[in-house]
Image (spheres, grey):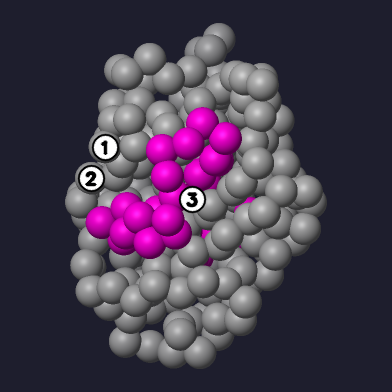
Amino acid sequence: MIGEIDRVVVVVPARNEERLLPRCLAAMDRAVSRLDVPVRVQLVLDACTDGSAKVVSTVEVLTVSERNVGAARRRGFEHAGAECDARTWFATTDADSEVEESWLSAQLEYARRGFEVVAGMVAVRQWDGHSAQTRRMYERQYRSHGPDGHGHLHGAALGFRADAYWGIGGFRALRTGEDVDLVVRMLAGGARIAWAEDVRVTTSARRRGRAPHGFAEHLRTLGRDEPQEVS
């Protein structure tokens, strides 16, 4: 049957996420419990120098030294033994993020409806270290881009069918923007995308991120662009 999924692989790259990783994995456990198909959660510890490896419980662990989030995501899917199979669903998030309980089950509903790519949304968990105006600017800008959907692409909230992923060569070894690059190539190859507002994660609002030009830098840029109050 078109869109039928009988296996799920989730890849979570992590670099020095000892503090946030337990919450990420606990949230993933809750999402996995909602599914009635086998799920493999593949954690990729990329050049970690902290205690990230000590907080891992039941998930599969791959240790690499890529220092590159695109390469780490790719290595995760390769290591999971994920073939180019239309009945396998891939998903990926970040180690500083917590997926909602319906994060995976909602993606599989889109897959059953014939979508090859699901692009979810990201909310910020806490705004410590940022001004109230930065938060307002982010939330004002983070709206639908048009009638086709919200238009945001995040590696923290992304899913795709295995055959569509490997059909365009998978993630490239990019230090940042690997999520946008992947989806652009998938869409160019004819993949159908769901801009899914019901596939959501919450993520940290730290000011120093792991990837250059990533989410943390985006928030800092908003702060620099704040209009100055006139006294």
User: Which is more toward the observer, 102 or 169?
Assistant: 169
Quadrant in the picture for residue 108: top right
Q: CA distance from mark 3 to mark 2?
A: 14 Å
Q: Are marks 2 and 1 in contact (CB under 8 Å)?
A: yes
> Residue flagged by tag 2: what amino acid is it?
Arg
Residue of label 3? 92
**Residue, x 35% and y 55% (percent of image)?**
78
Q: What residue appears at the point 26 percent right and 37 percent down from the top-left corner?
A: 169
| Three-letter amino acid code of the residue under disc 3 | Thr
Q: Is residue 176 left or right of residue 145?
A: left
Q: Secondary structure at mark 3?
A: strand
Tag 2's secondary structure? loop
Span highlighted in magenta in the image: 71-99
Taking the image as drawn, is residue 121 in sight? yes
Whole-angstrom CA distance, mark 2 to mark 1, is 8 Å
Q: Which residue is mark 2?
A: 172
Determine which of the numbered discs, if any, sits on residue 169 in the image. 1
Q: Nearer the viewer, residue 1 or 95?
A: 1
Circle 1 — which element? loop
Give yes or no for contact between labels 3 and 1 (Cβ–Cβ under 8 Å): no
Please rate how many residues cluster around mark 1, counting C-alpha atoms within 10 Å: few if below 14, some from 14 to 19, many from 20. Answer: few
Q: Where residue 206 appears, x then y in whole percent? A: 43, 65
Q: Is residue 164 above or below residue 113?
A: below
